[in-house]
């Protein structure tokens, strides 16, 4: 019975250590998520501060250069820089657009991403290209360097359409030919392609007019707020459970499982009078036993760590409860194998499996009850009823007709234990009972040795489905895994 008990309790340390690690990892991820959301709060405030500077500028039209018909030119500059800086601030990047350190009436209107920019906002694409050509002729150093021109976004789309389709919707053929001639002349005079010379500003021509620009800023701010919501929605996924986390949990379980099993095997050999550190006392077979047992312990620990990780992160189970649940199920699985091989009797299986399951029951009660005080006289009955349910659900699909008496023995134990509870505690057991249906699927996966040995993709899919992971989030193939790892 001692040997069976050792096998039953073997997975406990690996599973419960993995549970502690998973709890710590979840706490670290939770803290990182809280910090990410706090940083996003600050990023939104900074973005709105950039937009406020634009509002302040357009709110004092008397300070804007030009007359009533040309003030939109400087407005376009402020809108572009403000929107670009706000977007970068929102995404927690250092703003790269700058207008404050640029002379107000020089050949450069602002700097964007380290590139000198001249903004040309005229009514109509032909007029805008004329403005570009005039500036390029007067400022040769601007175009021979890396300087670029920003034009209204709607006019840039017309330019793009012309380059791609050789036509522009809504323009006459004569107008189109004039545009082509302008583009060819501009490219010839500057020695640069139109794609390299001209880019789109943040606003259309109409959006920067004095009667419309306040609405433009309103729309831009609403867009920033929508982007902010999307970034916040992404944060839980970025700081949520991951394949890498499950691999680390499996590694923790494997290391602990190997270490505990190695120590246990060496101690068992020592009790047989064999010292591994004395020459000649350990035979080749002894070392094979040590290696095989250690490898088995590592594999069992890896399965335990992997299972605890996804059980904790895919359900509402607390990490300590998940660790004890997995260790309990694996311990019962080891006892079940002993029983089926005839090494232990029905009575020994019932007694030992309930002892193993009681550990999961104790931790489960702590996780479910929280601050609730359980009257000491009924504590044993409560633990017993939960342990009985765990054992019964774990083994009912693995026992055949020959074990019908054992099944009935377990059922009677559970019934008697539940009858000793008061109504409040009985209600808690009923709630736990409702959840065991889902946990039984996990038990089947845990006891499938073919799956446990290699942690195959099929096992992962079944496991994810068993705990109600969204279908779209399940990795079903190597291609899915490659995509996940590259995101």
Image: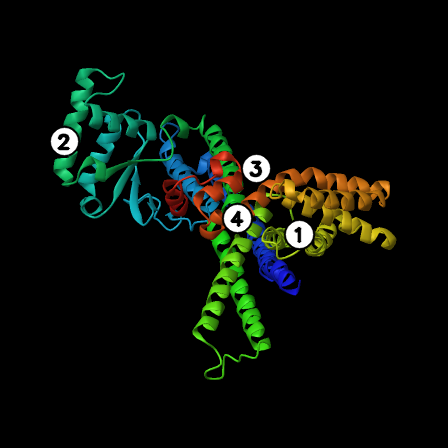
Is 94 on the left-hand or right-hand side of 120?
right
Quick one: label 4 or label 2, which is nearer the N terminus?
2
| Callout 4: SS | loop
Question: Which residue is pictured at 54% across the width and 44% down the height?
Answer: 445
Secondary element type, mark 3: loop
Tell us which disc is closer to us: 4 or 2.
4
Residue at which label 2 appears: 184
Whichever of callouts 3 and 1 sits on the residue coming sooner in the sequence is 1
Q: Which one is in front in this view, the residue at disc 3 or the one at disc 2?
A: 3
The CA distance from mark 1 to mark 4 is 18 Å
Q: Where residue 406 appears, x then y in whole percent? A: 70, 46
- The structure residue drawn at horizontal position 20% and vertical position 39%, both measured from the top left corner, is 136
- Residue 366's place in the image compared with 127, above or below, is below
- In this rendered view, identify the residue nearer to me: 365 or 50: 365
> From the viewer's perspective, is residue 227 above or below residue 340?
above
Q: In the rendered structure, which disc, 1 or 4, sits on the residue that comes first in sequence?
A: 4
Crowding around mark 1 (Cα neighbors within 10 Å: few <14, some 14 to 19, many 20+) is many
Mark 4 lies on residue: 241
Q: Using the numbered discs, state the Cα–Cα distance from disc 2 to disc 1 in whole angstroms.
A: 73 Å
Where's residue 104, x and y in %?
A: 35, 45
Single out the residue that lies furthest toward the bottom: 279
- Tell whether label 3 touches label 4 (CB within 8 Å): no
Q: In terms of sequence position, does the residue under pointer 3 or pointer 2 come before the other?
A: 2
Label at residue 468? 3
Q: Earlier in the sequence, mark 4 or mark 3?
A: 4
> Helix, strand, or loop for circle 1?
helix
Badge 3: residue crowd in 10 Å (few <14, some 14–19, many ≥20): few
SS category of the residue bearing label 2: helix
Residue 295 in view in this figure: yes
Disc 4, disc 2: CB below 8 Å?
Answer: no
């Amino acid at each position: 019975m001692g040997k069976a008990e050792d096998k039953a309790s073997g997975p406990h340390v690996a599973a419960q250590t993995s549970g502690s690690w998973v709890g710590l990892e979840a706490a670290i991820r939770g803290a990182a998520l809280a910090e990410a959301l706090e940083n996003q709060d600050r990023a939104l405030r900074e973005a709105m501060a950039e937009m406020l500077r634009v509002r302040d500028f357009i709110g004092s039209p008397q300070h804007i250069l030009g007359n009533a018909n040309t003030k939109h030119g400087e407005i376009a500059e402020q809108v572009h820089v403000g929107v670009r800086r706000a977007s970068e601030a929102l995404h927690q990047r250092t703003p790269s657009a700058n207008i404050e350190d640029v002379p107000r009436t020089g050949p450069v209107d602002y700097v964007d991403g380290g590139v000198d920019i001249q903004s040309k906002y005229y009514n109509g694409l032909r007029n805008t290209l004329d403005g570009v050509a005039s500036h390029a002729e007067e400022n040769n150093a601007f175009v021979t360097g890396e300087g670029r021109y920003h034009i209204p976004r709607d006019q840039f789309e017309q330019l793009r359409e012309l380059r791609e389709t050789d036509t522009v919707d809504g323009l006459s053929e004569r107008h189109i030919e004039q545009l082509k001639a302008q583009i060819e002349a501009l490219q010839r005079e500057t020695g640069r392609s139109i794609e390299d010379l001209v880019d789109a500003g943040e606003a259309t021509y109409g959006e920067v007019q004095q009667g419309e620009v306040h609405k433009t800023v309103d729309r831009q701010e609403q867009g920033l707020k929508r982007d902010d919501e999307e970034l916040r929605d992404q944060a839980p996924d970025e700081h949520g459970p991951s394949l890498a986390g499950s691999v680390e949990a499996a590694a923790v379980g494997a290391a602990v499982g190997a270490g505990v099993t190695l120590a246990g095997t060496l101690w068992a050999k020592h009790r047989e009078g064999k010292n591994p550190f004395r020459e000649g006392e350990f035979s080749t077979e002894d070392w094979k036993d040590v290696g095989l047992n250690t490898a088995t312990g590592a594999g069992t620990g890896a399965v335990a760590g992997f299972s605890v990780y996804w059980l904790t992160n895919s359900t509402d189970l607390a990490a300590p409860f998940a660790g004890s649940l997995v260790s309990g199920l694996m311990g019962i699985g080891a006892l079940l194998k002993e029983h089926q091989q005839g090494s232990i009797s029905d009575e020994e299986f019932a007694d030992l499996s309930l002892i193993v399951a009681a550990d999961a029951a104790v931790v489960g009660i702590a996780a479910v009850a929280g601050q609730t005080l359980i009257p000491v006289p009924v504590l044993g009955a409560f633990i017993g009823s939960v342990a009985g349910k765990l054992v019964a659900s774990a083994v009912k699909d693995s026992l055949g007709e020959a074990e019908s008496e054992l099944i009935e023995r377990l059922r009677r134990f559970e019934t008697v234990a539940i009858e000793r509870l008061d109504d409040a505690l009985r209600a808690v057991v009923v709630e736990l009972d409702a959840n065991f249906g889902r946990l039984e699927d996990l038990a089947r996966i845990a006891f499938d040795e073919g799956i446990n040995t290699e942690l195959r993709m099929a096992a992962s899919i079944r496991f994810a489905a068993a705990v109600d992971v969204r279908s779209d989030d399940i990795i079903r193939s190597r291609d899915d895994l490659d995509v996940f790892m590259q995101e």
